[in-house]
Each structure stands twice: as C-alpha cells, then as structure tokens.
Image (cartoon, rainbow, N blue to C red):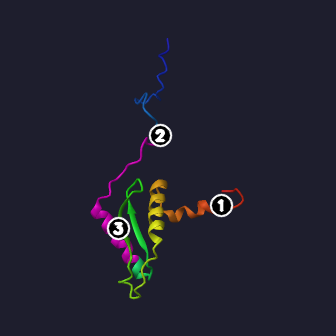
Amino acid sequence: SQPADDGGNGNGDEGSAPASAAPLALPSYTLTPSAAEVALSAALTLSRSNGWAVTVCVSDGGGIPLAVRRDDGSDDGRGVPAFAASYEIAAGKARSAASFGRPTSGLEGAANVRGGEG
C-alpha cells in the first residue's frame, strides 16, 4: 500500500511552508526619541545647506510625530522662517510615508497616473 500524502516534498520538511513563502509580518523597529532628534537635526542641516526653510517631522511607524521643528531661519543667513502651513505638510508627509512604508518622493509617480494606465 502507498503511504498517505502528507503534503510534503519528500526532502524531510513535510508540512512546512515552501522556502519562497513571504513572511507573515515585516520586521519593525522602534525609533527612540534621541534617534528622532538626530534624524531631525540631519534633515535641518541638509535643508539649510541648500537654503531651504522647512519644517521637519520625524514620525514613528504609525505616523505619530516623535520630533517636529519648524526652521526659524536664524541659521540660513536670510532670517526667513518656514511658512506656517509647513507644519501640516510635514506631518502629513510623515504620516503618508509611514502608512505606505516608503518615502513620499516615490509616491508622486503613482499619484500622477494619466488616462487610467499604470
């Protein structure tokens, strides 16, 4: 008589998921408050070196702000602060990046699909 088919592949790992199966959950990381401040400072340094007055928002994986700073313009030599509404824009971009799991710069192409293609 033939043994019952147990769904295995005959190489000793009967019943286990195939090696190509996707993980059930992606790894997650915790951003500490001090790491959020480091990221915020780096973003402000870059923006100031380009002469941009911006608001920077660093969020956790759920899009909740951990560190936010509106550039007051004191370090760019022009004294021009980031405009007031930039907070809402920065917080929205951080929330969107967290929701989609990617930088918002990569989402623009998806939003600009023309003619129902893409």
Front residue of 44 and 6: 44
Mark 2 and mark 1 residues within 8 Å of each other at the beta carbon: no
Residue that mark 3 sits on: 39
Seen in the image, is 107 located left or right of residue 52? right
Q: Residue at x 43, y 41 (%)?
A: 24
User: Callout 1: helix, strand or loop?
Assistant: loop
Position of 7 relative to 54 (above/below): above
**Residue 113: image tag:** 1
Seen in the image, is 112 located left or right of residue 44? right
Q: Residue 19 in the image: state x and y as whole percent.
A: 45, 39
Seen in the image, is 91 located left or right of residue 40? right
Q: Which amino acid lies under the numbered mark 2 shown in the image of this protein?
A: Ala
Q: CA distance from mark 2 to mark 3?
A: 34 Å
Q: What is the number of callouts on the image? A: 3
Q: Which amino acid lies under the numbered mark 3 shown in the image of this protein?
A: Ala
Q: Which amino acid lies under the numbered mark 1 shown in the image of this protein?
A: Val
**Magenta-drawn segment:** 22-46
Position of 24 relative to 110 (above/below): above
User: Callout 2: helix, strand or loop?
Assistant: loop
Residue that mark 2 sits on: 21
Q: Residue at x 40, y 69 (%)?
A: 56
